[in-house]
Image (cartoon, rainbow, N blue to C red):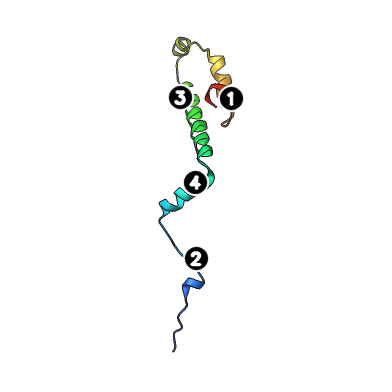
Amino acid sequence: MSTSSINTSTHLPAQTGTILDHIIRSITTFGHDRIKRLVQMYTVYTERREMRNLSDEMLNDMGITRVQLNKECQRGFSDLPDNRK
């Protein structure tokens, strides 16, 4: 019985670098500004969720009403307030 060897270099792409290298290349390709915007959107989204747990008294101390907060929380993930763009 003969065994044949397969030259994998012609059949498979070369594996270069680590997974971290791949992630860094992906981020660089995606664009630094887009990453910053996604982080900003997630930050605002998280803040909105956390503010829902505040008492009406705490909201009043910040100068907003529950109605204003509910309206803010209904905004979409990518809908940032003007002062956060």
Q: Amino acid at mark 4?
A: Thr
* Disc number lying in front (4 or 3): 4
Vertical comparison of 83 with 5: above or below? above
Q: Amino acid at mark 2?
A: Pro
**Quadrant where the image shows the C terminus:** top right
Vertical comparison of 47 with 27: above or below? above
Label 1 element class: loop
- Seen from the viewer's position, the closer of residues 46 and 7 is 7
- Seen from the viewer's position, the closer of residues 68 and 33 is 33
Which residue is painted at 51% across and 71% down in the image? 11
* Disc number lying in front (4 or 2): 4
Which residue is painted at 41% across and 51% down in the image? 20
Residue 17 percent coordinates (x, y)? 41, 57
Tell me whether circle 4 and circle 2 mark residues in contact (CB < 8 Å).
no
Residue 70 percent coordinates (x, y)? 56, 19
Disc 3 marks which residue?
50
Label 4 element class: helix
Tell me whether circle 2 and circle 3 mark residues in contact (CB < 8 Å).
no
Q: Amino acid at mark 1?
A: Gln
Q: Residues within 10 Å of mark 4 (few under 14, many from 20)?
A: few
* Disc number lying in front (2 or 3): 2
The residues bearing labels 4 and 3 have C-alpha atoms spaced at a distance of: 31 Å
Label 2 element class: loop
* Disc number lying in front (4 or 1): 4
Disc 2 marks which residue?
13
Residue 8 percent coordinates (x, y)? 47, 73
Vertical comparison of 61 with 24: above or below? above
The earlier-in-sequence mark between 4 and 3 is: 4
The residues bearing labels 4 and 1 have C-alpha atoms spaced at a distance of: 32 Å
The earlier-in-sequence mark between 2 and 3 is: 2
- Seen from the viewer's position, the closer of residues 26 and 53 is 26
